[in-house]
Image (tube, rainbow, N blue to C red):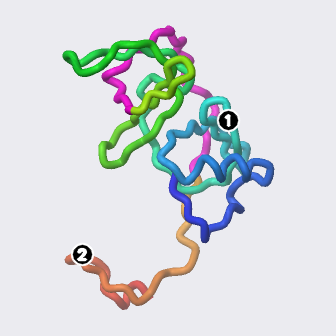
Amino acid sequence: MPRWPENGDAFIHPDDVSLVSRLIPSERVLRRDSYDGTYYHYRYGDLSFRMRPCLWLPIEAEGLDLADEVETIGVGMERELFIGVVTGMYYVRRKGRILYRLSRGDQTIGRLYVREHLRLLTEKRRVRKGEIDHPTPKWNGAGERIGGFIDLEPGGPDESAAD
């Protein structure tokens, strides 16, 4: 979830500012659970917080979540096989996928794993799709226009169209 310090923190619920400031900006995969008309309710493991609509990147779920018990799947003789717990989920844009951080007992494993190298140990029940349509904010076209730019795309609008 991208965020810049000059944007301030007005989009974060006042009670959640200290928590959210530790979580974003980052590559963490946050779960967006619901919308109450003003704030979206997010979750990252046991942590939950509220934020107003803002930029986010939808990511396809891979069937794993924080606190899931998993078994590593060895590739040749490269990896040690062990059972661990998912303690971090990060979306890496240059790879275009989620990478998972595991812990083994009290020790956090240094390397990150892709989904294909993990096997879920607990069966998850499938829940039917929700009946509540969570609205996505839509831009109505109102607002300031940016002028003074030159469109480098052939056939695009010329500079005078942007003023």
Left or right of 161 in this view: 155:
left
Query: In the rendered image of this protein, does residue 21 appear above or below residue 159?
Result: above
Left or right of 140 in this view: 119:
left
Give residue 138's position: percent from left, percent from top: 55, 57
Can you name the residue that lies furthest to the front here? 107
Residue numbers of the magenta segment:
111-136
Residue 133 located within the stretch drawn in magenta? yes
Q: Residues within 10 Å of mark 2 (few under 14, many from 20)?
A: few
Give residue 45's position: percent from left, percent from top: 61, 30
Closer to the camera, 103 or 35?
A: 103
Query: In the rendered image of this protein, does residue 17 appear above or below residue 158?
Result: above
Residue 69 located within the stretch drawn in magenta? no
Q: Residue at 49% of width from left, 19% of height from top?
A: 104
Left or right of 156 in this view: 129:
right
How many tags in the picture? 2
Which mark lies nearer to you, 2 or 1? 1
Closer to the camera, 134 or 39?
A: 39
Give residue 124's position: percent from left, percent from top: 52, 12
Q: Which residue is mark 2?
A: 153
- Kindly state the secondary structure of the residue where label 1 is placed: strand
Using the numbered discs, state the Cα–Cα distance from disc 2 to disc 1 in whole angstroms.
44 Å
Q: Which residue is mark 1?
A: 47
Left or right of 46 in this view: 3:
left
Residue 112: image quadrant is top left
> In the rendered structure, which amino acid carries the disc numbered 1?
Leu
Residue 59: image quadrant is top left
Please, what is the dominant secondary structure of the magenta stretch? loop
> In the rendered structure, which amino acid carries the disc numbered 2?
Glu
